[in-house]
């Protein structure tokens, strides 16, 4: 169990943080009495926090399941330490997201997000050509439609 907590320490911390965030949303975002017909200003933070919290719980449950499966399979074998964190990938992801932010207003949301999602997917190990082509486009269009149509947020357009 100690190894499980050490291995998933950040996920556990994030789950506790998100739970605290869920408790703070009502006191931080005031709802006006005029906007009863539209989506509440609290809706997006609630949905985002609940979705992220659910992903944390799912990640913890799947890791616990995989760990118990591995213990059953490897009874008697020593646990191999798996700390293969590629710091280059982390720095490259941060640099890519910074570059995305810088070119967002120049080439627009849709084009820049498709390019960034393609590069991130490839960089993180996706080699399936169909998924590599479809995921960035579908993800970008869903995000664009949710923000522009449902939440009425103006996203950067192409300048030319």
Image (cartoon, rainbow, N blue to C red):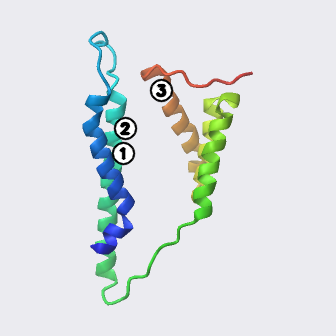
Residue position marked by numbered label 2 in the rendering? 48
On the question of residue 121 being in view, the answer is yes
- The numbered mark, 3 or 1, whose residue comes first in the sequence reads 1
Give x and y (percent) for residue 3.
33, 74
Relative vertical location of residue 122 with respect to residue 38 in this rendering, above or below: below
User: Is 119 placed above or below 48 here?
Assistant: below
| Residue that appears at 28% across and 36% down | 24
The residue positioned 62% from the left and 37% from the top of the image is 101
Looking at the image, the residue that sits furthest to the top is 34
Q: Choose top left, top right, bottom left or bottom right for residue 46.
A: top left
Quarter holding the N terminus is: bottom left
Picture coordinates of residue 19 (x, y %)? 27, 45
Q: Quadrant of residue 67?
A: bottom left
The secondary structure type at the circle numbered 2 is helix
Residue at point 53%, 32% (across, down): 141
Q: Position of residue 37 (x, y in %)?
A: 30, 12
Name the one closer to the observer, 46 or 146: 46
Residue 160 percent coordinates (x, y): 74, 21
Give the CA separation, mark 1 to mark 2: 6 Å
Does the residue at mark 1 contact the one at mark 2 (Cβ under 8 Å)?
yes
Q: Which residue is mark 3?
A: 147
Camera sees residue 129: no
Q: Mark 1 — residue?
A: 52
Specify whether 76 is left or right of 124. Answer: left
Image point (63%, 55%), residue name: 92
Cα–Cα gap, marks 2 and 3: 13 Å
- Lower position in the chain sequence, tag 2 or tag 3: 2
Residue 100 sits in quarter: top right
């Amino acid at each position: 169990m100690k190894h499980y907590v050490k291995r998933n320490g950040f996920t556990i911390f994030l789950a506790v943080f998100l739970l605290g965030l869920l408790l703070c949303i009502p006191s931080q975002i005031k709802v006006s009495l005029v906007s009863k017909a539209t989506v509440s200003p609290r809706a997006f933070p609630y949905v985002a926090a609940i979705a992220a919290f659910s992903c944390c719980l799912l990640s913890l449950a799947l890791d616990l399941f995989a760990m118990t499966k591995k213990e059953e399979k490897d009874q008697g074998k020593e646990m191999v330490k798996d700390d293969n964190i590629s710091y280059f990938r982390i720095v490259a992801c941060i640099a890519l997201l910074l570059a995305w932010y810088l070119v967002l207003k120049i080439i627009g949301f849709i084009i820049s997000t498709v390019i960034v999602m393609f590069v991130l997917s490839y960089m993180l190990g996706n080699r399936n050509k169909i998924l590599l082509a479809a995921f960035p486009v579908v993800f970008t269009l869903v995000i664009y439609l949710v923000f522009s149509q449902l939440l009425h947020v103006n996203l950067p357009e192409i300048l030319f």
